[in-house]
Image (cartoon, helix red, strand yellow):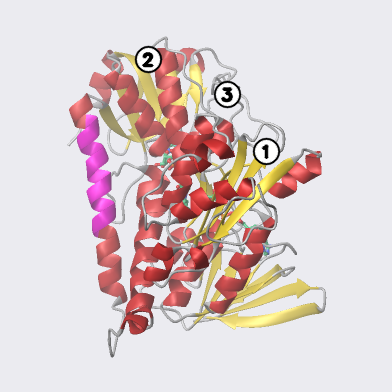
Amino acid sequence: MSEAISPSAAAEERWDVIVIGAGPAGYAAAIRAAQLGMRVACIDKSVDAQGKPTLGGTCLNWGCIPSKTLLDASHKFVEASTGFQAFGIEASDVSINVAKMMAQKDAVVAKLTNGVASLFSGNGVAWLPGHGRLHGHCAVEYTPAAGDVAMLAAEHVILAAGSAPIEIDPAPLNGDTIVDSQGALEFDATPQRLGVIGAGVIGLELGSVWARLGAETIVLEALDEFLPIADQRIARDALRALRGQGLDIRLGARVIGAAAAQDTVTVTYQDKDGEHELEFDKLIVAVGRRPYTEGLLAPDSGVNLDERGFLYVNDLCATDAPRVFAIGDVVRGPMLAHKGAEEGVMVAERIAGHKPLVNYDCVPNVIYTHPEIAWVGRTEQSLKADGDTYRTGTFPFAANGRALASNDGAGLVKIVADAETDRVLGVHVFGPQASELIAQAVIAMEFDASAEDLALTMFAHPTLSEAMHEAALGVSGRALHMVNRRRA
Ligand code: FAD
Ligand code: NAD
């Protein structure tokens, strides 16, 4: 466990760094600062289902890790139910024990959150369970779960308070039939009829989990366009694939009311044809997240908010208050664990006098459906809108030996490169293990690679990565395993 320290002992210290929030942004900052020889304390108020303080924030407790555990579990269930048959493996009477699946998820979460506690301990980070509030001059008011409030003094403060689900008036949460993402990770049985508001990342991931386990799932999305931030071709293919898996995704469907009865919810939504009503056993509200700043700033903190309620920071994550930084979901930029963690490392190193930067042009995005959707950099539609000239290379997994060997041949890789310099501007993958494949693109873009650099690189055969190679060759019309319209 992490170094135990009482509030009064904490108040006697002059901390080099106090971090408020121990999600992936805050804990990465705390560990890196400690590695650099600083005296660090990290305050976090999260508690687990048993009321015990826990580290890791949303990501480890109620976000990335539990959702990926359920996505993997439900994917294995589909594979065992129907996927094995193509290989001659007969598995009859496949069933899902939701309680066991949840126990496995909880075990993974416990392992990882305890792992952060061990890392704190091993690096000498003092874990202060409770609430933190920033005052002027880097003074932090610490309210422990039990015990007296203490005022702590620090040279630097890093705010990493994270985000919370957005709630909407038409569908007020009741913790039972109408839930947010956290509730949807804790159903004790597969709902027969599931409604999801929002076809964003959470709606698609958690909708997939329960649809795979047998829930009749309807996803209501207010926008007419599906996944507007993704490449349009990939969004179109993904919509078709997900609908084919039984997710009934309705676009242009704005929810205007949800009435909960004993065990059901009646949802009213509006589309171009008028108003409609649907009845569900459970309704997941997944309409986005907002920065979480409740109780974080005393009036004299000197930290300002931007017009959308995020803590205002510059490119280096410095707030308007001297020696106070803010990172992760509570500041501008994509709400992703790895983005926050990189900001945490940057800030810790800057405090130590180093000069790192976060490259916001190279943040990978992944949606863990099956097939997965992943991308980094610019989309074709955004380049077109800006009037930039570009070339594209695409390659389908249907022509990739490894994908076919595992009967997983849906999807494609698409590379967008500058028409003049050939520099890779964006890479988009819809297919098996897109989350892993995209790392190659991130590395290539970090090193300012051209499509030709990727084309000249040797990839092992047979691998899914060969689709990346072929797409790079395709930028100049030289893909080997497809007929090129453009020849080079
Ligand atoms: P958080 O993880 O939210 O941590 C903030 C911590 O600060 C919390 O523990 C909070 O209790 C604490 N805190 C807040 N205020 C105070 C205070 N005043 N005093 C003390 N403590 C305080 N991202 C990905 O990159 N990949 C994924 O696959 C992914 N899946 C997700 C799935 C779901 C269902 C959800 C909800 C999110 C997912 N995310 C994913 C997003 C990811 O969880 C967040 O981007 C990430 O957790 C943000 O990290 P953070 O450290 O900024 O904040
Ligand atoms: P989101 O912004 O991705 O999607 C919300 C969707 O809800 C939007 O498409 C929006 O148009 C729709 N919507 C809003 N109001 C509506 C209404 N009244 N009726 C119907 N549709 C409505 O938000 P999210 O899915 O809640 O995810 C929140 C954040 O968490 C994201 O920013 C994401 O970065 C992060 N996250 C990431 C991952 C991952 O990296 N794999 C997984 C989960 C969450």
**In the image, which residues are magenta?**
107-120
**Looking at this view, is 445 or 114 the one in front?**
445
Give the residue displayed 44% in from the left and 61% down from the top: 432
Q: Position of residue 404 (x, y in %)?
A: 42, 69
> Mark 3 = which residue?
299
User: Marks 1 and 3, Cα distance to the nearest angstrom?
Assistant: 19 Å
Q: Earlier in the sequence, mark 2 or mark 1?
A: 2
- The quadrant where residue 108 appears: bottom left
**Looking at this view, is 163 or 481 the one in front?**
481
Q: Amino acid at mark 1?
A: Arg
Magenta stretch prevailing secondary structure = helix
Is 229 left, or right, of 347 in this rendering? right
- The quadrant where residue 210 appears: bottom left
Q: Quadrant for ligand 1?
A: top left
Q: Is residue 441 above or below residue 410?
A: above
> Mark 2 = which residue?
153
Q: Which SS class for mark 1? A: loop
**Looking at this view, is 107 or 77 the one in front?**
77
Q: Amino acid at mark 3?
A: Pro
Q: Residues within 10 Å of mark 1 (few under 14, many from 20)?
A: few
Give the residue displayed 54% in from the left and 21% down from the top: 316
Is 59 left, or right, of 251 in this rendering? left
> Mark 1 = which residue?
308
